[in-house]
Amino acid sequence: MKKLMFTLALSALVTMGTQAQKQMGDEHNIEVSFTPFSGSPIDGSTIKYRNFIEDNRAFRLSLAISNSNDLHAWYQDGEILEADPVSPQLNITTKTSSFGFAPGYELHFDGTDNLSPYFAFEVPIVIGKRSDTQQFWGPEDINDAGQPDQYVVWNVGNEQGSTSVGFNILFGADYYFSDAIYLGFEAGLGFGKTTFGNHSITTDNLTAFNMFFNNAFSTDAAGAEVMGEFVGQLPFSAIDGVIYSEYYPDGSGPDDVYYTWPNHISNTSLGNMFQGSLRVGFLFD
């Protein structure tokens, strides 16, 4: 039924478009993705702006911004210790953010009265960041071990950033079914490179951290700096219990624990591109 309704609607749009007028120059354009068979037909996660400096030339800029900040309780009040004292609620915070933009240029061809095919290039740049913070409850001094009334809440943070830069050569077309609204598609060839910033582990209480994770019960061991900055991408998820995984590349950790995962430094890709959703846009002066 959805496919039938969409086919009928598309046929109606084509009929309406017989008298539609495409861009003439000096217009502006806002565009989003159109996925008629999905739960959300209009996808505004990426918004594209175009400025037609002439009827056959346009500057374009795509923007994509996302941010998520979630708070979870992984221990309730009293779950670790019911009394004398009651242990506090401990939380996990997960944050992800991404900012992407892609400046570009389009050269449009004659096409028909309603159809505007074009050749384009763009330079997409995406900056992303992921961080988890987990709370713990325990002694902050080696003399306080086993004395819950002296315990404090402290944090461990795990963070990773990435940057992606690319260059896309594209072919597309816009079909105007009214003087201001069009549907379109886009495909082409894309080159991209993603690099990962240094992976970083931090804590706001060094002694508590070393006592909990490294079994440090001497003054020197409890004051040791965190081996917490590494080149390349490392997987982590505080929700799944992976916040700090005993990184000892020289085997100096307890029981000779080694960190053996390969660290992903960068990725380079070259291949065909196709935008799986239709593009729907609005043209205005």
Image (tube, helix red, strand yellow):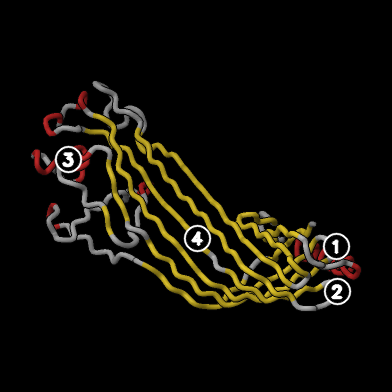
For the residue marked with disc 4, what is the amino acid?
Val
| Mark toward the start of the polypeptide (4 vs 1) | 4
| Mark toward the start of the polypeptide (3 vs 1) | 1
Q: Considering the numbered disc 1 on the image, is that residue within a helix, a strand or a loop?
A: loop
For the residue marked with disc 2, what is the amino acid?
Asp
From the image, tell me which residue sits under label 4. Answer: 126
Question: Is residue 40 visible from the viewing direction of this image?
Answer: yes
Q: Considering the numbered disc 4 on the image, is that residue within a helix, a strand or a loop?
A: strand
In the picture shown, does residue 224 fall above or below 257? above
- Front: mark 3 or 1: 1
Question: Is residue 37 visible from the viewing direction of this image?
Answer: no
Nearer-the-camera pick, 5 or 53: 53
Nearer-the-camera pick, 213 or 50: 50
Give the CA distance from mark 3 to mark 4.
39 Å
Residue drawn at x 27%, y 38% is 204
Give the CA distance from mark 3 to mark 1.
70 Å
- Quadrant assignment, res 45: bottom right
In the rendered image, residue 282, in percent from the top left (x then y), is placed at: 76, 58
Categorize mark 4 by other alpha carbons within 10 Å: few (<14), some (14-19), many (20+): some
Residue drawn at x 39%, y 48% is 131
In the picture shown, does residue 234 fall above or below 75? below
From the image, tell me which residue sits under label 1. Answer: 179
Give the CA distance from mark 2 to mark 1.
11 Å
Give the CA distance from mark 4 to mark 1.
34 Å
Residue drawn at x 20%, y 25% is 150
Give the CA distance from mark 3 to mark 2.
74 Å
Categorize mark 3 by other alpha carbons within 10 Å: few (<14), some (14-19), many (20+): many
In the rendered image, residue 280, in percent from the top left (x then y), is placed at: 73, 62
- Quadrant assignment, res 12: bottom right
- The answer to whether the residue labelled 3 contacts the one labelled 4, judged by CB atoms less than 8 Å apart, is no
From the image, tell me which residue sits under label 3. Answer: 211
Give the CA distance from mark 4 to mark 2.
36 Å
